[in-house]
Amino acid sequence: MTARRPSPVRFGIVVFPGSNCEYDSKHALSTFPEAEPYYLWHKDRDLQAPDVVILPGGFSYGDYLRTGAIARFSPLMGEVAAFAADGGLVMGICNGFQILTEAHMLHGAMLRNRGLKFVCHSQHLRVERTDTPFTRRLRVGDVIQVPVNHNEGAWTAGAESLQQIEEQGLVVFRYCDAQGAVTDEANPNGAVDNVAGIVNEGFNVLGMMPHPERVCEDVLGGVDGRDLFGSLIDHVLEAR
Amino acid sequence: MFKVSVYVTPKSGISDPQGATVERALPALGFEGVEQVRVGRFITLEVDGAEEEVVRRDVDDMCRRLLANPIIEDYYFELTASGPGAAQMSVDGDIVLPSDAALRIAGEHAGSPWTAADPFAHRESESEE
């Protein structure tokens, strides 16, 4: 125990039946000395005073009906929605992003990938916004490399909603090539406008299909994910 | 009691990779001229209730809030009041079909390719390797 860190940044990781990236998320966060990650069971009704809630990747409820469709009815999701409505930071990764759209906490919806292809590779992303709690360690136009690993990641939205999203600049990451060009060839799943990650109007809820928790250590092939979790830690500590 | 059939389809204008893939596969079986294939979901429910209007409103609510995602999907549904002549529930929950319906279904199955020993047998005549 260290006296100089009396109050760590608490990351509550919600585990649903079928989640499978909660361990990766907890492990990645455990490499940050300031962070205190812990699990929450979807049937809990208490978030246990988190600074950030993580909805991890996986196949919650077996992806029955639609990805994320059933998870949003878990008892804890009501608490997560209330936490977010109150300005709390929520980050949904992959299946977590799918859950957030189904819960209407983020715009849009997910379709099967273009070509019905399950994608699993390291993907370049262009950073579109850095004035969010999730991306403040990055610069606009930065190209980061984060793995994608999904089957239903073609984010889409109605025309009206799409216009609103672009006008308000809610897109945080777009799929791009190694040079940062946002092209159709660089789009792994057919997502509208190459959208890989978006925030809500309050900038406190982020959903992204790529997995930043998998690139937090050199031994795993990259550290670009550290900037996202690091940004959250900076944001929380600064707000205290 | 009402039997409910809910049809969920991708909204027009929303890309449907499943439909597109099926559409590309059909010509390979010799079916030409097939367009606009859309793959959706068919959901059946039985809803307890006496008043059709009330059940109809509830089912519409179910569709909007769970069975379909209105951002990407359209839905419609049909209600059928359970009664004489329709399939009836027996006491233990097994479906008891009226005999004429049972015969009709049996007749359809008799001519179905799925009753053949090997449904893909026809492929052998098509490709000779």
Image (tube, rainbow, N blue to C red):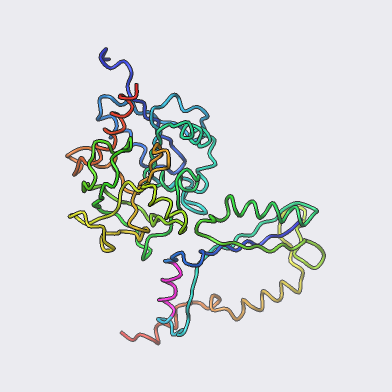
Identify the residue shown where x is 25% and y is 14%: A4
**A192 vs A212, nearest the viewer:** A192
Quick check: is A94 in the magenta stretch?
A: no
Quarter of the view holding residue A155: bottom left
Quadrant (top left/top right/bottom left/bottom right) for the C terminus of chain A? top left
**Residue B103, above or below A21:** below
Measured from the top left, where is residue A159 in percent x and y?
45, 59
Quarter of the view holding residue A163: bottom left
Position of A68 compared to A198: left or right?
right
Position of B100 compared to A180: left or right?
right
Q: How many marks?
A: 0
Quadrant (top left/top right/bottom left/bottom right) for the N terminus of chain A? top left
Measured from the top left, where is residue B70 in percent x and y?
54, 56
Identify the residue shown where x is 59% and y is 53%: B64
Quick check: is B23 in the magenta stretch?
A: yes
**A133 vs B106, nearest the viewer:** A133
The residue sitting at the front extreme is: A167
Region of the chain picked out in magenta, as a range: B18-26
